[in-house]
Amino acid sequence: VIEPRTKNSQIPQGTLIRRHRVPKPPPNDDEFYTIEDFNVGKEISLYSKVFKITNCDEFTRNFLRKLGVKVNVPDENPADPYTKYRKSMDESMQALRPYEKHDTLKQFLDHDRQVLRFFCYWDDTDSMFGDPREMILHYFLADDTIEIREVISPNSGRDAAPMFLKRGKLPKNIETLRQPGEVTDRTVLNVFGPTGHGGRYILDSLKTGAVRTDFYKDSDLTLGSVLNVWGRKYVICDLDDFTKEYYRTKFGIEDFNSVSYKKGGYGGVERQWPPYNGWGSEEDSLCSCMGLLPKPPKRDFIKFMEKDRRGLDSNVLRFLARMDTSKPIDQDRRFIISYFLSDDTILVFEPPVRNSGIIGGKFLERSRVKKPEQPLYSTQMSEYYLSSDLYVGSRVIFNSHVFLLIDADEYAFRYMEECPQEFPKANIESIINRLRGSVGKNKDEVKSFFMRNDPGGSGVLGYDQFVSLLKQVDSSLTDQEIMTLARFYSERPSEDAIDSRKLFAIIQEQLRKRNYEGFSKLVEDCQQHDQGKQGFLDPETVRTVLHAHHVPLPDDLLRAGIAMTPANERGEVQYAALINQMNWRDAPVPPMQYQPIVDDSQWQGTNQSNKISVSRICYNVLLEDFFGKSS
């Protein structure tokens, strides 16, 4: 219970009864007041003090109505004659002409940290050694102050001063310096009486002798307007987006055509670098020309951190290549070209072959490789091979040796397919769009080709037949694009079946270690819960039964096993199939053997037994993507 404080009441007011459970008066002092005891017009006794409820707020009224309580009509509080008398006395003591108040707090709270930005232009060419100057004017809405900063271009010969005009109110006209006491908030009209104590004065309410100074406001700052900044003419040429929205909302201005003020200056002179002298790398020689003190070239550290090896993710693309030459000895040689994504370097390795007469080993040291037909001593930086230049079917020249890329490892194929923007030859969408345009009106011929090569109508086509068809449709397709299509539409084993077999092998291994054999009791308990004898139960019911029988399985493994079990349309699980798959006695599953990670650092080409087979392509899905499902 809180009583509002009254000035000079001489009564202890404020919190009369703090918040707690208040007991009812005797003889019901063993009970406490509840919400049912309160209503408008009732009198309640709190510690022998009787309070009459005269009104309530809207929230309380709605709350009582929801409880089914009929709220009475509010009463008026009785008037206090003495309070009225004191209030009339206070009003009579107020001055008829109070001091003028300047309330700047509201403006500060409404517009704090809101700044209008204008791009200005000051033509100072009339003065000696003057030139056009670009300025940025900031108008602070919190207190109507202005600051100006200068835009200093590089190599302009000017000192980079932090502020051209410090923040303050900007007058519209230049005035002479005022005398002390001339600019005041209030003007004295007359003074009478003795000087000093006991003297009287009258304020000038009309402000006939007040000195007025006009300052720039937000309404004066418009596009094309000329500002007088202490004798300098500033032209407002442009605004930022926040300023445009402010003027559009407050003043309804919609035309914000900027004023062109930048003259076509002299074009930037391109810096000419001396040609490469052949010493060190090109980057190192170029850094020596940038200053008196030579500095080493900066390495792309961010790219190195992003593309460096992370665990099993090597970020190295490996390709199998052969020499494109007419020499019979070199035609049978095979090379492993490794491209390191962290620093764009290339390593060429030749696997040794017994009785070949060639030692093998490292053919090209890891380094960046220049593209052919570039001048050695040039003023421009040389072009190097990048990751997009290497793909299956491409022809590259490393130090006058011509290589033809004929294969890639699984990591390289997968990486290029995951980054189609970086590798356009592995972009499945662009390849499909290109083939769709090449097929054009030959829809019937393509379908007849598939029908001839698949007489059984299985919907699967061999890889060689698939390649020959694509070559007939578009002979410009590269081997990389053909392999990308074949991998995308290849027939792959069902991963769900493999995961289900692995999962229940792990479950049976856990139950076998704990020697759990209560499978018959599990079936009987599930049958008791299955009142309709349909053979299906809710997944939560099955999980509850398994927990009730203390099946020694973790909850996440148990939920995964239930999710892998066949279910009906209502999502109910076939509990007999679940328990049968868990039964390691009657339906054992071969245990999953540990598959160590194979170190393929000596990879020498694609091993068909280890990679995902692309020998069978589902051409039905390909036809749907080309011609639609109606085909």
Image (tube, rainbow, N blue to C red):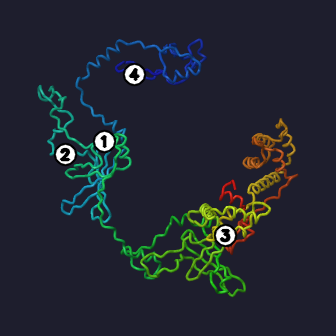
Where residue 164 sits: x, y (%)?
27, 54
| Label 3 Cα neighbours within 10 Å, binned few <14 / some 14-19 / many ≥20 | few
Residue nearer the viewer, 299 or 22: 299
Residue type marked 1: Asp
Residue nearer the viewer, 26 or 163: 163
Where residue 31 sits: x, y (%)?
60, 17
Cα–Cα gap, marks 3 and 2: 84 Å
Rendered position, 127 above or below 381: above
Q: Earlier in the sequence, mark 3 or mark 2?
A: 2
Cα–Cα gap, marks 4 and 1: 36 Å
Q: Which residue is mark 4?
A: 5
Residue 472 tag number: 3
Residue type marked 2: Asn
Cα–Cα gap, marks 3 and 4: 97 Å
| Label 1 Cα neighbours within 10 Å, binned few <14 / some 14-19 / many ≥20 | some
Is residue 576 toward the left or the right of residue 489 in the image? right
Q: Which residue is mark 2?
A: 173
Residue type marked 4: Arg
Asked if residue 513 can be seen in this view, the reply is: yes
Q: Secondary structure at mark 1?
A: loop
Is residue 507 toward the left or the right of residue 62 in the image? right
Q: Earlier in the sequence, mark 4 or mark 2?
A: 4
Rendered position, 142 above or below 31: below
Q: Earlier in the sequence, mark 3 or mark 4?
A: 4
Residue nearer the viewer, 117 or 88: 117
Foreground: disc 3 or disc 4 = 3
Q: Which residue is mark 1?
A: 143
